[in-house]
Amino acid sequence: MTNKKIKKIKGIEKYSNKKILITGASNGIGAALLRIFLDAGATVYNFDKVAPTDAGSTKSHFIFCDLRNTSSIISATKKIKDNKIDVFISNAGIIVRDEILSASNDDALASYNIFVEGPRILLGNLNLSPKLQIVNISSMHAKYNDKSPGIYTLHKIMSERLIALASKPYWSNLTCYLGHVDTALTKSGKSNREYAKQKNDRISPELAASLICKSMSLNAITLTYDRVTKSYTVICKNK
């Protein structure tokens, strides 16, 4: 899939004056999402353990939050306790490329905390809108049940179930099964040769963020990368 020129996102204006929380928005897809929502007039909270360096990102509200640490999460939520969150985007991540039984205990625990336990604690301690929109940035590995990277696949699937089980009647959920995106996370643990082979399949973080925002504005329930057609499909909830 090649990168196309990114046009103005239809329907993005509905997020003007909304309060949006994005985990891991200091770089990559999270930073691209942050810029789109800032341009739309939203208030954006960036919960990350690394401060942003991008000039546009610094206009958001950066709050230190390490999803591997309960105390850090609770401390971060207290800083915005008086603000009702309209949109929660679970984007922060790491990738453990080992298969399930060969991953180290430390790596497996860190992955679980970032994808499952951290978001669970956040959702349980934030002041949430009764019409909350949750966006889970997942991966094609979860969609296709890939055994490698097994730990990553497992915890991405668990994150989907977490959100489904935690959801309330008037919440809306979007799961994004993304393909290859040109980020540091995608490159992590891959050889230069392997990464180069995927060059034509990768899209930019900005294009990925644009696809996600378009799906959000449509109140879609899934955005899915198809490995055969190398294209994305959006599925919306029946009215």
Image (cartoon, rainbow, N blue to C red):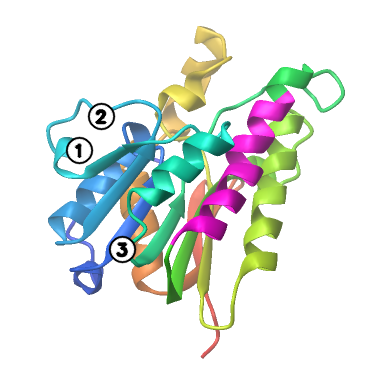
Viewer-closest of 75 and 6: 75
Q: Are there few (<14), some (14-19), or many (20+) residues within 10 Å of tag 2?
A: some
Name the side, left or right, on which 131 lies relative to 5.
right
Residue identifier under label 3: 83
Q: Are marks 2 and 3 in contact (CB under 8 Å)?
A: no
Q: Are there few (<14), some (14-19), or many (20+) residues within 10 Å of tag 1?
A: many
Residue placed furthest toward the right = 101
Q: Residue 201's spot in the image, x, y percent? A: 47, 34
The amino acid type, in three-letter code, at marker 2 is Pro
Q: Secondary structure at mark 1?
A: helix
Residue identifier under label 2: 52
Q: Which residues are magenta?
A: 108-126
Q: Are there few (<14), some (14-19), or many (20+) residues within 10 Å of tag 3?
A: some
Viewer-closest of 118 and 99: 118
The amino acid type, in three-letter code, at marker 3 is Asn
Q: Residue 123's spot in the image, x, y percent? A: 53, 58
* Looking at the image, residue 239 lies above or below residue 148: below
The residue under the point 43% across, 30% down is 200
Instruction: Please identify the quarter of the rendering in which residue 51 is found.
Output: top left
Residue placed furthest toward the bottom = 239
Label 3 vs 1, first from the N-terminus: 1
Residue identifier under label 1: 57
Label 2 vs 1, first from the N-terminus: 2
Which marked residue is nearer to the observer: mark 2 or mark 3?
3
The overriding secondary structure of the stretch rendered in magenta is helix
Q: Residue 166's spot in the image, x, y percent? A: 64, 66
